[in-house]
Amino acid sequence: MNIKCYWDSNLKCCPYKRYIEIFFKDKDISFNKKKKVFAIIKNKIFRIKNCKNIKCIGELSKSLYPYNYWEIRIIKNSKKLIRITFFHDIEKREIIILDGFEKPNKDLYNQKDQYDYDSNLSKSDYYLKEYIKNKKYEEYE
């Protein structure tokens, strides 16, 4: 199974890789913690890559209704959660990583945060539609 990152023509980069760059520039987290969280992200992506069926993917991520993609959930710290959205093309045996973003822990959640989260999900949906239309991507490293 191949892993690809969606390439956005408007951003001139991969939204997921852009998020990872922003994540590593975050001054609120130590470098060792960043490396640990990034290792967790990569581990989950590679475990999903090796899944043989949907049930296995469901144990590592969450399907987002009404969207046609999945979400990997990782804890960044006590205040923030990391979300990585991806599309699993079963026929082509490909995983397309769409985007990465953060959302507050639900104890700190408010209406604006819900709006931001919904906006990020809508962007991921747009990225998926653009990927299906244009097939622009970079290989996952």
Image (cartoon, grey):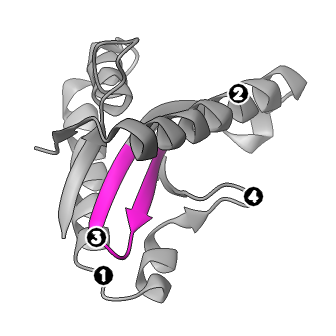
* Residue that lies at the very extreme toward the front in this rendered image: 133
99 versus 94 height, above or below: above
* Rendering coords of residue 43 (x, y %): 23, 61
> Residue type at mark 3?
Lys
Q: Which residues are magenta?
A: 82-97
Residue drawn at x 49%, y 87% is: 55
Residue drawn at x 21%, y 64% is: 46
Which residue was labeled with disc 1?
51
Which residue was labeled with disc 2?
119
Mark 4 lies on a secondary structure that is loop
Q: Nearer the viewer, mark 4 or mark 1?
A: 4
Q: Earlier in the sequence, mark 1 or mark 3?
A: 1
Which residue was labeled with disc 4?
66
Q: Earlier in the sequence, mark 4 or mark 1?
A: 1
Which residue was labeled with disc 3?
92
> Residue type at mark 1?
Cys
Q: Is the C-beta separation of discs 3 and 2 under 8 Å?
A: no
93 versus 121 height, above or below: below
